[in-house]
């Protein structure tokens, strides 16, 4: 079974996931050209090698009209149209429906579009819950929106290209302390991120900064099949996605392209007792079970308190 294991010991962000997955791609120039040809106006991604703590990895920079935007500031409500973005000139805003229309016009597959819309909706739902307002009232800043869409679409494209059978992820390190945003100083994980991480194993760690962003949390929530410590794997390739902040510890998200040793020998046995079923119906059921992938199917007649023989 082709497995992706994501190690989130330093959190997760859209750019880190993009870079780490891109590191697993064989034909990097071809993939980068595809990523820069999706039709998102003014958006260009640069992926280049960097080193942190002696570890070689990749860093992904998404530029919108030549400017690199901060991922954690991509969404806010209608009461704060420009705060926190460092732009003094006006920008238009988009609703979730606007974002859906932007995504559906992109030069990507229908599967990528569906996944990107689903991830973006998770973010909007978390923002709406954090602000206690209907999801239709959430508005997204134009430049930040393009930046967030790019990160999400790139990850969806890379996962479609790599085509893993299952995705497993470690517990997520969120960081701790506080983060400054358009609304003021908030605790880490930020409210929207905390809502996105509901049901996902997470911990603060020792570093006082935001390590897991809303985009990173939403991507994990949508794509990951299960969260656990690293299972037994036969690793084929490892990818490193580097963050922008510098710490004593390497700020990277690591991904493992592997074969799942545990899944290869695992067989489930299903048993049931069936009363009053004809032989023709049982034969039909056996055929359907084999078509569904059953390794073997067998029937054993038995006699219960009623003298009439029952089957199975």
Image (cartoon, helix red, strand yellow):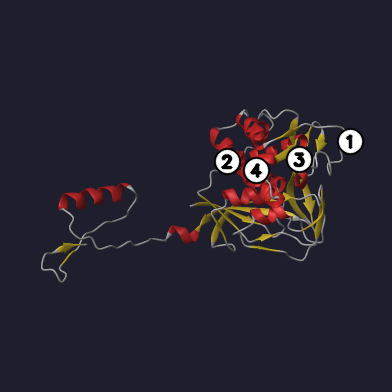
Q: Name the residue beneath numbered marker 3.
A: 78
The residue at 72%/55% (across/down) is 191
Q: Name the residue beneath numbered marker 4.
A: 135
Question: Mark 3 or mark 2, which is nearer to you?
Answer: 3
Q: Nearer the viewer, residue 85 or 252?
A: 85
In three-dimensional space, the C-alpha distance between marks 2 and 4, rounded to whole angstroms, equals: 19 Å
The residue most toward the bottom is 305
Q: x, y percentage for residue 128?
A: 67, 47
In three-dimensional space, the C-alpha distance between marks 3 and 1, rounded to whole angstroms, equals: 17 Å
Report if residue 25 is visible in the image: no
Tag shown at residue 220: none
Q: x, y percentage for residue 17?
A: 67, 48
Q: Nearer the viewer, residue 262 or 288?
A: 288
Q: x, y percentage for residue 211?
A: 74, 56
In three-dimensional space, the C-alpha distance between marks 4 and 3, rounded to whole angstroms, equals: 12 Å
Q: x, y percentage for residue 85?
A: 83, 41
Question: Mark 2 or mark 4, which is nearer to you?
Answer: 4
Tag shown at residue 115: 2
Q: Name the residue beneath numbered marker 1.
A: 88
Question: Along the polypeptide, which appears first: circle 4 or circle 3?
Answer: 3
In three-dimensional space, the C-alpha distance between marks 3 and 2, rounded to whole angstroms, equals: 26 Å
Question: Along the polypeptide, which appears first: circle 1 or circle 4?
Answer: 1
Q: Is residue 27 above or below residue 180?
A: above
Task: Give SS at disc 3.
Answer: loop
């Amino acid at each position: 079974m082709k497995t992706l294991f994501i190690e989130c010991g330093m959190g997760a962000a859209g750019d880190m996931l993009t870079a780490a997955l891109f590191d697993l791609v064989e034909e990097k120039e071809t993939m980068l050209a595809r990523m820069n040809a999706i039709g998102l106006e003014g958006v260009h991604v640069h992926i280049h090698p960097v080193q942190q703590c002696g570890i070689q990895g990749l860093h992904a920079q998404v530029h919108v009209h030549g400017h690199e935007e901060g991922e954690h500031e991509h969404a806010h409500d209608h009461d704060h149209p420009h705060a926190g973005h460092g732009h003094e000139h006006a920008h238009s805003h988009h609703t979730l429906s606007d974002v859906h229309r932007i995504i559906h016009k992109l030069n990507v597959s229908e599967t990528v579009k569906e996944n990107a819309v689903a991830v973006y909706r998770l973010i909007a739902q978390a923002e709406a819950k954090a602000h206690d307002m209907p999801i239709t009232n959430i508005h997204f800043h134009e430049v930040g929106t393009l930046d967030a869409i790019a990160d999400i679409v790139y990850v969806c494209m890379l996962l479609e290209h790599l085509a893993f059978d299952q995705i497993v992820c470690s517990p997520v390190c969120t960081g701790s302390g506080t983060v400054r945003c358009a609304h003021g100083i908030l605790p880490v994980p930020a409210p929207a991120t905390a809502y996105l991480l509901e049901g996902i194993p997470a911990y603060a760690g020792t570093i006082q900064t935001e390590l897991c962003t809303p985009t990173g949390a939403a991507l994990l929530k949508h794509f990951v099949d299960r969260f656990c410590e690293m299972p037994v794997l036969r690793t084929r390739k490892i990818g490193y996605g580097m963050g922008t902040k510098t710490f004593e510890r390497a700020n990277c998200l690591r991904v493992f392209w592997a074969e799942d040793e545990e899944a290869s020998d695992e067989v489930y046995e299903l048993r049931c007792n069936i009363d009053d079923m004809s032989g023709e119906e049982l034969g039909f059921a056996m055929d359907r079970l084999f078509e569904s992938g059953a390794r073997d199917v067998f029937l054993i007649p038995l006699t219960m308190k009623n003298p009439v023989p029952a089957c199975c």
